[in-house]
Amino acid sequence: MNIGIYSRKSKITESGESIKNQIELCKEYAHNNFNVKNLYIYEDEGFSGGNTRRPRYQEMLRNAKEKKFDVLICYRLDRVSRNVLDFSNILELLASHNIEFISIRDHFDTSTPMGRAMMYIASVFAQLERETIAERIKDNMYKLAETGRWLGGITPLGYKSTRIVDKITGKSISILSNVPQESKLVEIIFKKYLDLGSLTKLQLYTLKNNLKTRNNKDFNISSLKNILNNPVYMAADNEAYNYFLENNSLITKELSSKDFDGTYGIMAYNKNNEKKHVPHKKELSSWIISIGVHSPIVTSANWIKVQTILLSNIHRNYSIGSKTAILTPLIKCKNCRVPLKIISKYEDKHVKHFYYKCRVKESTHNTDCHVKNLKGNLCEEIIFDSLEQYLSVDKLIDKLQNYINTKIEFDKDKEIAELEKEISETKNAIYQLTLILSSKTSSASKYIIYEIEQMDNKLQSLNKQLKMLTDTTTNGTDNDYNLNYLTNGSIHNLLSNEQKKILINKIIKDILWDGDKLEVELLPVNNL
């Protein structure tokens, strides 16, 4: 069994529970209780337990995700963290990778039912801390909203960030000020969207008229939608006040409808939720609304009309990708430099064949572009055949074999999804029991703990079933057949559309179609 050992000491000294002593005690415990195959030692000296930015700690987390060890041992719980939230997070990470955690001084062992019950209790307190932090952040955000200041980040198109001295506090703060040329562009974007009623048509309009972003890039649908959704551009007038009031947004308490006179623009806080560093827009009821000190660009009436149109079009798929076509969004019209769209021909509700077609050609009814449509299946065959001849066959085989070895996972998606659902429901049941446990007397506790143990045993069984499914790969016979097919046949015939798309995006930078021939620009071969 592979064992990880983590040790930490705040000060670099030889006295007390030194790192050396911690490690020796952990090694002794490991050899006494496990059949040790490999030991991985992670030592951090001179770091506080309240700080998770420790080099060896971070390395240990990375190795845990790679399943480098099966058990993590430490001398005492506070060696890992003194923060309940951080401690709960690492327990969740280890549990998700089926790694047991042991603290030898505290007799904490997640391989035992009592240890897992303690883990669930810790998660309850961690959740409480998360909610407390969220409330604190919201309170701070509310206080900042009263000033109408710009809190930082990428400034929206049409504005720049300017430092001024706040008259009340005397402190330096940031505010938004208009950039005339960019503001004009924002006006055009709102006006044209109201005229066209379509993000796709709006994007084509910007491409045809050579309208660029601040960084001189073409607008994509996502960037246009973000501009149209941003309330910073709207006038803070009475109509805006009523709109946010009706949508249950939190308007700063010192403001009344009389303050919304249209002189300045709206400042909205707490709009986004960061998930994996990607912003996801929150519901309007979570927004904190204030009045900024910047000039608005569009009327509140027009901004609200735009939201109504966006909402009515939400059922449309604005993605330029396709489940059928694997070359989007890489393939573009050479004349217009616009991604080609997919035109499918159906027979008995099934796609018989499809074409790649220039969007400009379609939207202008062949007046601005005359590039011929491109047969999809034929084009993809040509692209893959060319790639197989061009690239290093050995390297391509190694990479594709990894995809082929995981094909069976796609066939088991349904079964895996059902197991994951049952695991989630069981975890939730344990969580609810833990909440009850934290509020009951000692006489009732033993019965609740028994229930938690029973549920936990079920959870362990479900996790084992899930692991067996997710760890399964094709057998050796299939692998031999696949390798033989790779070296003697067409590689891409073995791949699903999803795998083909992954491969294409790792190899090709751009594909241009001029109506007669295809031009393919490859990424460096090292990318593969």
Image: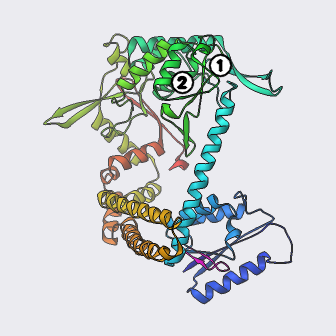
Q: How is the image coloured?
A: rainbow
Determine the residue positioned at 50% across, 14% down: 239
Residue 103 magenta-highlighted: yes
Q: Secondary structure at mark 1?
A: strand
Residue 159, numbered circle:
1
Q: Quadrant of the N terminus?
A: bottom right
Residue 312's tag is none
User: What is the residue that sits farthest to the left in this orientation?
Assistant: 348
Q: Which percent across, then down, holds residue 526? A: 55, 49
- Which amino acid type is shown beneath numbered disc 2? Asn
**Of the residues shown, which amino acid type is indicated by label 1?**
Tyr
Specify start and end residues of the magenta stretch as a single range.
101-111
The CA distance from mark 1 to mark 2 is 13 Å
Answer whether labels 1 and 2 touch (C-beta < 8 Å): no
> In this view, which residue lies farthest toward the bottom?
32
Q: Give the number of the mark in front: 1 or 2.
A: 2
Q: Earlier in the sequence, mark 1 or mark 2?
A: 1
The structure residue drawn at horizontal position 39% and vertical position 48%, both measured from the top left corner, is 388
Residue 204 or residue 273, whichever sits in front: 273
**Which quarter of the picture shows residue 39?**
bottom right
Instruction: Please provide percent x and percent y for residue 448.
Output: 45, 72
Q: Position of residue 419 (x, y in %)?
A: 34, 63
Quadrant housing residue 273? top right
Q: Taking 191 as reference, is 485 above or below it? A: below
Q: Between residues 121 and 207, which one lies in front from this camera angle? A: 121
Q: Which residue is mark 2?
A: 230
Q: Does the magenta segment cover residue 232?
A: no
- At mark 2, the secondary structure is loop
